[in-house]
Image (spheres, rainbow, N blue to C red):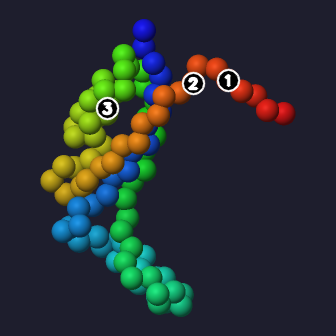
Amino acid sequence: MTQKYQAQIYVTLRPSVLDPAGTAVQSGLRHMGHNNVEEVRIGKYIQVSLTAENKTAAMDQLDCICDQLLANPVIENYRIELAEVSSSVNIHS
């Protein structure tokens, strides 16, 4: 029996990689008077829903998806948060 999972994937540039978009945002914030902002790094947030036999299988598949498509492993890191989705639906009025 398969279980449904919801994944939140955060992709960020490796610390050693320059982030021109983050630098531009930081500069804009300083021009707006936010001089206490020390660093800005820009990344991606991706949600994926999938079914798998178990949590390990889901994580293995998500790692493969990230390495092959969602992140560039040469310059980016990624972090996956995975949760089982309950089969019951609660509707609140």
User: Does the rendering let one see residue 33?
Assistant: yes
Q: Quadrant of residue 17?
A: bottom left
Q: Which residue is at 31% across, 27% downward?
A: 56
Q: Amino acid at mark 1?
A: Val
Q: Element type at marker 2? A: loop
Circle 2: is it few (<14), some (14-19), or many (20+) Cα within 10 Å?
A: few
Marks counted in the figure total: 3
Q: Which residue is mark 3?
A: 59
Q: Which residue is mark 2?
A: 86
Q: Which residue is mark 1?
A: 89
Q: CA distance from mark 2 to mark 3?
A: 18 Å
CA distance separating discs 3 and 1: 24 Å
Of mark 3 and mark 1, the one earlier in the sequence is 3
Q: Amino acid at mark 2?
A: Ser
Q: Quadrant of the N terminus?
A: top left
Mark sitting on residue 62: none
* Mark 2 vs 3, N-terminal side: 3
Q: Residue at x 79, y 32 (%)?
A: 92
Report if the CB atoms under discs 2 and 3 are less than 8 Å apart.
no
Residue appearing at x 51%, y 86% in the figure: 34
What is the spatial separation of the Cα atoms under label 2 and label 1, in whole angstroms? 7 Å
